[in-house]
Amino acid sequence: MIDYKALICCIENLEGEKAIEIIENFIAYNPTREEGIEVMRACQIGTEKVAHLYERGEYFVSDLLVAGALLEEIKQKLEVIIGEDICCFKSGRITLGSVFGDEPEQGEIVLARIVQMAGFVVIKAGVKVS
């Protein structure tokens, strides 16, 4: 069986090789579709933890991209188990906003697009933060 906590931890810590090894061992077990969906949910939890670390300033945009690429690789491996519904799984959510007094910069727009390309849903803060 699969150790969900270890998988989440590997994704959170950006340990891609270990996460892929866990996934490959899981696939060798010949899991059901429901088990595959549960594994994808665990992977989403891991990438959401990466998003929280980014929002707290502990991770960088490059870390978001690594987590998004890792999730995409896992999705490709699990597609044979889950099917086409696999495309519904996103990396997580990120909130972007401007500092009070600043206008949205081109950099913020570019960052939002990069984060979206990594599979994250971007939520724009409607309030300026001081």
Image (cartoon, grey):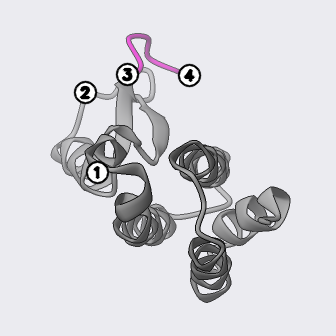
Q: Earlier in the sequence, mark 1 or mark 2?
A: 2
* Mark 1 secondary-structure assignment: helix
In the image, residue 46 sits, relative to residue 1, either above or below, namely above
Residue that numbered label 1 is attached to: 111
Amino acid beneath label 4: Ser
| Viewer-side residue, 34 vs 23 | 34
Chain-order first, disc 4 or disc 3: 3
- Which badge, 4 or 2, is on the more N-terminal residue? 2
Please tell me which residue is depicted at 81% across the width and 67% down the height of the picture.
6
User: Which of the two residues, 38 or 65, is positioned nearer the viewer here?
Assistant: 38
Q: Is residue 9 above or below residue 37?
A: below
In the rendered image, which residue does mark 2 sit on? 103
Q: Secondary structure at mark 4?
A: loop
* Magenta part of the chain: 125-130
Residue wearing tag 3? 101
Residue 130 numbered tag: 4
Cα separation between marks 4 and 3: 8 Å
Q: Position of residue 60 (x, y in %)?
A: 52, 64
